[in-house]
Image: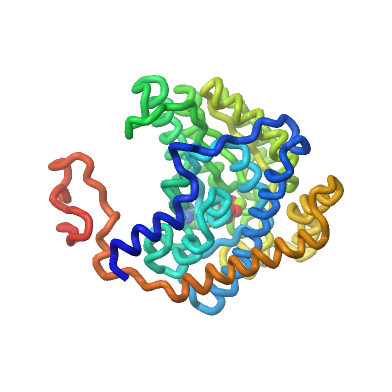
Amino acid sequence: MTQATVQSEQSMTTAKADSQTAGLAPTAKNARDLPKEVLLKWLRDMQLIREFENRTMQAYQQAKIGGFCHIYTGQEAVAVGTIGCVNSDDPVITAYRDHGHALARGMTPEACMAEMFGKITGCAKGKGGSMHMFDRPNWLFGGHGIVSAQTPMGAGFAFATKYEHEVLGKTLEGGEAKKKVTLCYMGDGALDQGAFHEAQNIASLWGLPVIYILENNSYSMGTAIDRHTANHENLIDRAKGYGMIGVKIDGLDIMNIYNEFKPIVDQCREESRPAFIDLKTYRYQGHSMSDPQKYRTKDEVDQYKDRDSIAKLVSDLMEMGYLSEDDWKSTQKALRDEVRAAIDAAESAPVPEDDELFTDVYANPEKNLSPTATYSHGTKNPLM
Ligand SMILES: Cc1ncc(C[n+]2csc(CCOP(=O)(O)OP(=O)(O)O)c2C)c(N)n1
Ligand SMILES: [Mg+2]
């Protein structure tokens, strides 16, 4: 396969959403009034993430995936529910536990899995791996491994979209500028990083439409939140200190997430202001694939599994008459097949050519401003 063929195939696999004809978020006030298709799509996406993550763990244990790898099971309702409240061309940025956000945003399982296998068909052509899922056509800007590094960038995206709308009157590409909201996800370990406080200050001072979504799973690696964060039960007070909207939401019930989160998205978009959401959730697996989990009990994990967000949505949809036992079985089977196909495709895809090492690594928008000014894609970086 030539490089050109690989690249055009790859952009087809990741480019599900067309930024020019962006999908709009639904408008119903209550999740129960949403069209049946929307609710079934949520269930499908959550189960896709669960299946994908279970197979990722297997592939990792078989040493088909290298590097750090963080599993999202337990937290599915957060990515699917919050992304379900925004338009498909609103920017999204997150930390390293990012497979769920990528899939919820519309990245194909093939592109996501191949990225972890280090293959050229991956969303970052195999150079990013598990922690760096990027999908420009679907407005996903990472996947970031440095705790809290994404929080100032979230403010930056909100600044850019506000500037396009209010100052330029068009996008940098010359398209229609709209009022956009940026979703910036973070873990509880990012709460006390200085970068986050600086970002909140600027976001509030300049009225930036960014929503910081704290995926509060109570642990930063092996350190429980009551051991790493002061006044952790009243985190939204911190947001108020910065003059931001601050709301605490139960993140295990996707209908509840929609009901509480959608009005905040609408307000931030309309009034161009930032928010901080303390979304309580739980991760079922260890911090990463190498975590003996001595810091929590099996009982605690089981208590959260008893409140599983997928089981809750299945039972709600059955009670509403939108889903039968047979439908659910066939959905699960179809997703198992889809993820298996993604694994097979990742396994058989080629690894990147050597010159990929120097492609898409540096950008030189301003020629002559840096010693790498003469560098162009595919050529050797003069600094190396
Ligand atoms: C600045 C920085 N310090 C330390 C680390 C090491 N580290 C990686 S993940 C992590 C825990 C972060 O936990 P949290 O933000 O709660 O996210 P979660 O893993 O729960 O999704 C730490 C300390 C890092 N990547 N970056
Ligand atoms: Mg955490």
Q: Residue at x 49, y 61 (%)?
A: 112
What percent of the width, then of the height, locates residue 138?
A: 47, 46
Q: Is residue 297 above or below residue 155?
A: below
Quarter of the picture holding the N terminus: bottom left
Q: Position of residue 8 (x, y in %)?
A: 35, 58
Name the residue at 36% across, 20% down. Answer: 167
Q: Nearer the viewer, residue 330 or 188?
A: 330
**Image-based side of 37 in relation to 375, left or right:** right
Q: Kindly identify the residue that appears in the image at 54 percent across and 57 percent down.
A: 99
Residue 383 versus residue 139 in the image, above or below: below
Image coordinates of residue 225 in percent, x first then y, are: 65, 49
Q: Position of residue 147 (x, y in %)?
A: 49, 50
Foreground of the two, 101 or 41: 41
Q: Quadrant of the C terminus?
A: bottom left
Corner quadrant of residue 87: top right
Kindly give the residue lying farthest to the right in the view shown: 319
At 55% across and 22% down in the image, what residue appears?
270
